Image (cartoon, rainbow, N blue to C red):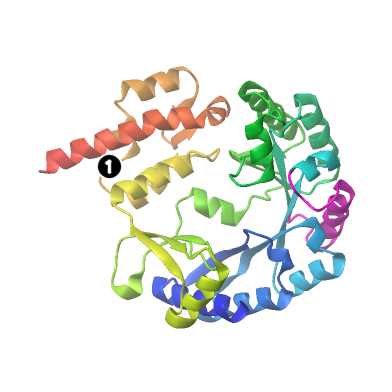
Amino acid sequence: MRSCLTREAQTLIRLSQVQRISSVFFGGGTPSLASPLTIAAVLETVSRCAHLAADAEITLEANPTSAGASRLAGFRASGVNRLSIGIQSLDDVELRLLGRNHTADEALGTLEEAKKLFPGHTSVDLIFGLPGQSVSSWARGLEELLQLCDDHVSLYQLTLERGTSLFKQVQRGSLPVPKQEVVAEMYESAREMLRDVGFRQYEVSNFARNGALSTHNLSYWQGSQYIGIGPGAHGRFVPRAHGESLREARIQTLEPDSWMKEVLAFGHGTRKRTVLSQLEVLEEVLVLGLRTDTGITHQHWQQFATSLSLWDMFGSSEEVKELEDQGLLLLDDRGLRCSWKGLVVLDSLLLTLLNQLQQSWADRTAHRN
């Protein structure tokens, strides 16, 4: 597995011809089960194939049960400088429901160790909208965590995955999930609690204080190129070594054994490549950029759309004007962004904005022809 990860990293970095890498994120599954030697080998390969910036953010996702103190120290020695801990909940009943094999006490123990090793660079994940959870029980758990956490918190609404026992129990009706308006209230109350203790909501699900924003997360929201390595990984980059100039969406083979066979045979295990048109790239820039509190600046938009400004796209739309009048959206000299109120209903705003983007694009194409 180690040699396949390093081989694929080398192949894809060379294919992209990127010169500089600003962040590396070991995520998906449970990377803290890997040997620190594997992490070190991947980072060594990355820095051999491109310039890995001295201040590059190197994050590892850790599960409380596979992240004892000595193991965390091993990861730090291998080059990791930021940790993201999947705490999920501080209620043992909820953790069992989620199929997690750690307890709340173990999670807090891991958090303590992580803060010693990665002070100011330890993030925690929490899940809301769980069966049996109320707004007050959720708020209590979050309040407890806020006494102990570091400077970065990520909040995710529960998504039920097909094939899991939780999915089956909810389908059968033996486990009631909170109603949508209750889930919305959980999110709202969490945003306010975090704001009150100095956290900035810099993205729909991510909160930071003391400037501890995640470089890697931000690069997704800003539409940067990224290379996905390992089974099931996703990437977005231009394969310049093949003489291409358009960005591709890439997905690596999901099954580890098949992926390894492909890497050994071809140097990489890319299962699916989709060339993205300029409109598709702009749609992604819009959808991802508006997830952040700063939104999309005019300069940022110009990097992707040289001939159509944000004003050209959205400035004369009645529907966009209506969203501005409702206090949900702002289009001004800085750019396009959601208000504090608008971030909560982003999905409904995007329907209007994507329609407008497609319409403006079609008009421009017709005008050119």
Extreme front residue here?
Answer: 172
Q: Is residue 55 magenta?
A: no
Question: At 33% from the left edge and 54% from the top edge, which residue is drawn?
Answer: 276
Q: Is residue 322 left or right of residue 184?
A: left
Q: Is residue 183 left or right of residue 281?
A: right
Task: Using the image as rendered, state which of residue 200 and residue 332 is in the foreground.
Answer: 200
Question: At 75% from the left edge and 25% from the top edge, which residue is drawn?
Answer: 135
Which quadrant does the C terminus fall into?
Answer: top left
Task: Using the image as rendered, state which of residue 330 and residue 369 is in the foreground.
Answer: 369
Q: Is residue 101 magenta?
A: yes
Q: Is residue 38 left or right of residue 64?
A: left
Q: Quadrant of residue 25?
A: bottom right
Q: Is residue 321 above or below residue 251?
A: above
- Residue 349 can be seen, yes or no: yes
Which quadrant does the N terminus fall into?
Answer: bottom right
> Badge 1 is on which residue?
308
In the rendered image, residue 272, in percent from the top left (x then y), is placed at 40, 62
Task: Using the image as rendered, state which of residue 111 and residue 129 is in the foreground.
Answer: 129
Q: Is residue 248 above or below residue 195?
A: below
Give the amino acid type for the residue marked by disc 1 in the picture: Leu
Report helix, strand or loop for mark 1.
loop
Question: At 63% from the left edge and 60% from the top edge, which residue is drawn?
Answer: 27
The residue stretch that appears in magenta: 98-122
Task: Using the image as rendered, state which of residue 203 and residue 273 is in the foreground.
Answer: 273
Question: At 73% from the left edge and 56% from the top edge, which residue is drawn?
Answer: 121
